[in-house]
Image (cartoon, rainbow, N blue to C red):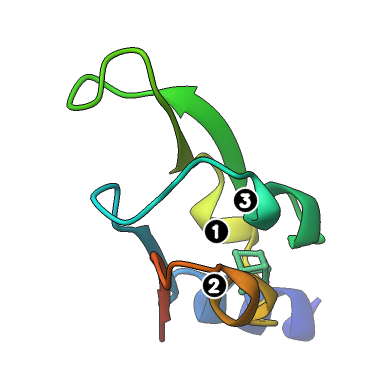
Amino acid sequence: MKNQHENAEENSLVEVKVDHSKCNGDSICVDVCPVAVFELQEVSEYPGEKKSVVVDNDACIVCRACEVQCPTQAITVEE
Ligand code: SF4
C-alpha cells in the first residue's frame, strides 16, 4: 500500500503538455504511450484538424517515449 501511495504522489507531480502549434496530428504519441495518456481530438483553436490531447495526465509513468518519438517535438513531460 505504501508504494501505491508514493506512486500516486509522484504522478501528481508530472505534467504532460502538447504544443498544438507544433502537433501535426500523426498520432505517434497515441501509439507509443503505454498507458493511453493521449487521444486525437479536434480542438477549438484548430477547427477541422486533429491534435493530440492529454486525456489522462496522471497515468503517465514518465517513460518519455512520446517526447523522444514526436517528430515535431510538440510534447514535453515535466516532473
Ligand atoms: S512519458 Fe510515456 S507514459 Fe508519459 S505520456 Fe509520454 S509515452 Fe505516455
As measured in the structure, the alpha-carbon distance from the residue carrying label 1 to the one carrying label 3 is 8 Å
Percent position (x, y) of residue 18? Answer: 37, 56
Q: Which mark is residue 40?
A: none
As measured in the structure, the alpha-carbon distance from the residue carrying label 1 to the one carrying label 2 is 5 Å
Q: Amino acid at mark 3?
A: Val
Name the front one of labels 2 and 3. 3
Write the residue at 74% across / 60% down.
33
Percent position (x, y) of residue 21? Answer: 23, 50
Write the residue at 51% across / 40% down.
25
Mark found first going from the N terminus, 2 or 3: 2
Q: Helix, strand, or loop for circle 1?
A: helix
Q: Quadrant of residue 39?
A: top right
Question: Residues at badges 2 and 3 in contact (C-beta under 8 Å)?
Answer: no
Q: Which mark is residue 37?
A: 3
Q: Which mark is residue 11?
A: 2
Could you tell me which quadrant the N terminus lies in? bottom right
Residue projecting furthest to the top: 48
Q: Amino acid at mark 1?
A: Asp
Q: Which mark is residue 58?
A: 1
Name the front one of labels 1 and 3. 3
